[in-house]
């Protein structure tokens, strides 16, 4: 999704009878309010979610949507498909057609998926540079051991790309189950990491992305991402 950001004076000229040059006078007269705060510069950034008021009249008030969904197996991480049910088919929201997926899961992988209409937000939390941790519960075909824990912490070498994965935290829950936290999202990464031990992943379930946890959300159900979760993501990802 292409980001939308423009200067305040340009926004005013495009959305009112005032020109870009008029904006300085409007600012001096304290007639423009952005997100409840009187504007003070023609260069202030206006995004698609900035509430803009001129003389008490709202020129823009679109709100972002952030949803957490528990993806069942056999559902495609896409907004539309002619052959398979998609994540968006599960969503009941009046603005569902605006939403896109922030971090996909494989067809048979289950668990937490984030959806939003905020392209800048989804790009940042999905970026490898952000290093927002994702936590999975994994079931495998062969017994686990401390050797796995050490190897995952050191990084697993992927010969095809000639790279080594960043350190990942593996907690063994039982002989065949573990909880894995990593900060990357390379192609089939979890399966390939266990594949380095010739150990097949039988089930993969994402339980959290950063501070957003799946909790007891039923398969196929969605909920709004809470204010405290959004604030923590903003702190971790945007530094605000």
Image (cartoon, helix red, strand yellow):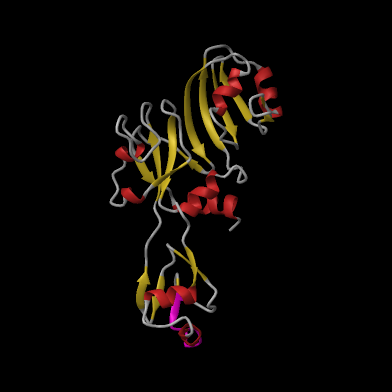
Of 156 and 151, the residue lying toward us: 156
Instruction: Tell whether 94 sits left or right of 104.
Output: left
Task: Find residue 158 and report its image quarter.
Answer: top right
Per the image, is 144 magenta? no
Per the image, is 31 magenta? yes
Of 230 and 182, the residue lying toward us: 182
Residue 73 picture location, percent across and down: 38, 26
Please report the residue visible at 54 percent of the width from the left and 33 percent of the height from the top.
Answer: 135
* 204 vs 29: above or below: above
Q: Is residue 38 visible?
A: no
Residue 71 picture location, percent across and down: 39, 33
The stretch in magenta equals 27-33
Residue 224 picture location, percent across and down: 38, 48
Please report the residue visible at 47 percent of the width from the left and 28 percent of the height from the top.
Answer: 205
Of 206 and 7, the residue lying toward us: 7
Please report the residue visible at 37 percent of the width from the left and 29 percent of the height from the top.
Answer: 72
* 71 vs 42: above or below: above
Return the residue found at the far top: 142
Please report the residue visible at 58 percent of the width from the left and 32 percent of the height from the top.
Answer: 181
Q: Give the quadrant of the C terminus.
A: bottom right
Q: Is residue 10 visible?
A: yes
């Amino acid at each position: 999704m292409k980001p939308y950001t423009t200067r305040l004076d340009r926004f005013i000229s495009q959305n009112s009878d005032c020109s870009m040059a008029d904006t300085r006078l409007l600012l001096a007269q304290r007639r423009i309010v952005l997100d409840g705060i009187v504007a003070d510069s023609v260069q202030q950034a206006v995004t698609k979610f900035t509430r803009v008021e001129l003389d008490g009249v709202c020129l823009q008030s679109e709100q972002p949507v952030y949803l957490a969904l528990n993806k069942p197996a056999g559902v495609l991480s896409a907004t539309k498909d002619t052959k398979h049910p998609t994540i968006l088919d599960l969503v009941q929201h009046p603005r569902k057609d605006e939403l896109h997926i922030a971090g996909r899961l494989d067809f048979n992988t289950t668990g937490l998926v984030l959806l939003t209409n905020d392209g800048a937000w989804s790009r940042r939390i999905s970026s490898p540079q952000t290093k927002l941790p994702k936590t999975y519960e994994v079931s495998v075909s062969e017994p686990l051991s401390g050797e796995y824990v050490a190897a995952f912490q050191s990084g697993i070498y992927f010969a095809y790309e000639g790279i080594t994965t960043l350190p990942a935290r593996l907690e063994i829950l039982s002989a065949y189950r573990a909880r894995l936290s990593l900060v990357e999202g390379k192609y089939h990464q979890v399966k390939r990491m266990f594949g380095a031990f010739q150990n097949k992943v039988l089930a993969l379930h994402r339980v959290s992305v950063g501070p957003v946890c799946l909790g007891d959300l039923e398969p196929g159900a969605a909920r709004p991402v809470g204010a405290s979760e959004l604030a923590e993501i903003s702190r971790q990802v945007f530094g605000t």
